[in-house]
Amino acid sequence: MESIGKKALMYALSDGELEEQIKESAETNGFKMIKGKVGSMSTEKIFAAVETAAQREGLVRGEHYRDTHALYHAILDAFVGICRGQLGLGNMLRTVGLIFTVVRGPRTSDNRDDGEWLAVVLYGTIGAPIKGYEHETIGLGLNHL
């Protein structure tokens, strides 16, 4: 059984040949996925980068409220994870450098009866805007469509 959250996490943490294997396996099992990068001291830029990529690649349809609403909440949950509950970047003198993944599909590969879901992973570094003052962070958000 493959779960949407596990696929999103594995995809975010992989690179090279393993990244391609994960994507191929996921797509074979009914998942759609994208991966991108963003870095900023602005919360709005993080959200905008993920939303724009998901819409551009067809994982969500901007004209459908349910799609954009589900994506927003999945991003927000992942963002809470990377910020450890303290929602803020630049206003708290923090910056991030992140890889993000968005995955759309069934909650699990063996149960397609509960509709489609979105998973968002944010993985990278967070810290003071001084080189060497950052540490790793990760967040996962899931929401149903």
Image (spheres, helix red, strand yellow):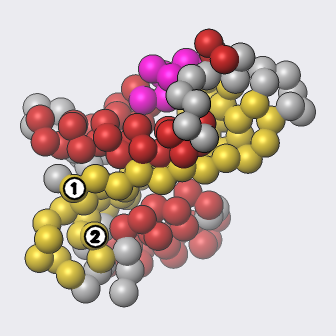
| Res. 7 in view | yes
Above or below, 25 against 75 in this view is below
Residue 49, horizontal then vertical, whole percent: 44, 30
Q: Residue at x 50, y 39 (%)?
A: 80
Front-lying residue, 65 or 22: 65
Give residue 15's quadrant in the image.
Answer: bottom right
Q: CA distance from mark 2 to mark 1?
A: 8 Å
- Name the N-terminal-most of marks 2 and 1: 2
Is 45 magenta? The answer is: yes
| Residue located beneath label 1 in the image | 144
Q: Residue at x 85, y 22 (%)?
A: 130
Judging from the image, what secondary structure is the residue with disc 1 in? strand
Residue 84, horizontal then vertical, whole percent: 60, 41
**CB atoms at circles 2 and 1 under 8 Å apart?**
yes
Q: Quadrant of the N terminus?
A: bottom left
Residues drawn in magenta: 41-47
Badge number at residue 107? 2
Look at the magenta stretch and give its main secondary structure. helix
